Image (spheres, rainbow, N blue to C red):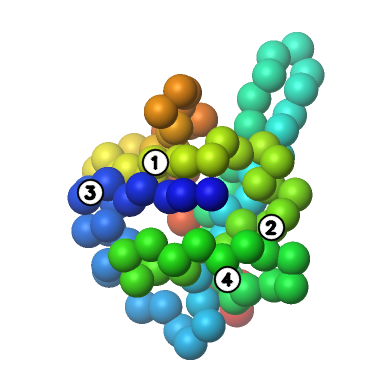
Amino acid sequence: MKIEIKEAAMNELSKIQFENGEGIRILAEFVGTCSIATDIQLQIEEKQAEDEVISENGINFFVPKISLESLPGKILLDFKQGLGYKISSPEETFGYNFKLKPRNP
């Protein structure tokens, strides 16, 4: 999987002080009810055994193998002030207003 970080998102991510071994976990789950959607969460965490590590612009992204099944081969990460992060692919937008959850204490 490839992650392209847009300039606005990179500027926002550069403000984060990651501790040793931390990165951004991307959790994605296909949700099929009366509509079809992918539920995505972003959180600062450490790598876990089942994660694929994707390093982009010096930032590690941890994607559990099960989440890879719900995501395309390439995603775009952008940021809009007041709206939060936007995750999309060349084919579709997965959503706006994603918040990056801080690490658990």
Q: Nearer the viewer, residue 68 or 11?
A: 68
User: Mark 3 — residue?
Assistant: 8
Classify mark 4: helix, strand or loop.
strand
Q: x and y percent of residue 48 in the render?
A: 69, 72
Which residue sits at x=74%, y=73%?
A: 49
Of mark 2 and mark 1, the one earlier in the sequence is: 2
User: Mark 2 — residue?
Assistant: 64
Spatial CA span between label 4 and label 1: 20 Å
Q: Quadrant of residue 88?
A: top left
Q: x and y percent of residue 46 in the render?
A: 60, 75
Of mark 2 and mark 4, the one earlier in the sequence is: 4
Of mark 1 and mark 3, the one earlier in the sequence is: 3
* Amino acid carrying mark 3 in the image: Ala
Spatial CA span between label 3 and label 4: 22 Å
Of mark 4 and mark 1, the one earlier in the sequence is: 4
Which residue sits at x=46%, y=49%?
A: 2
Q: Quadrant of residue 55?
A: bottom left
Of mark 3 and mark 2, the one earlier in the sequence is: 3
Classify mark 2: helix, strand or loop.
strand
Instruction: Classify 57 as above or below 22.
Output: above
User: Mark 1 — residue?
Assistant: 76
Spatial CA span between label 2 and label 1: 18 Å
Classify mark 3: helix, strand or loop.
helix
Which residue sits at x=46%, y=55%?
A: 100
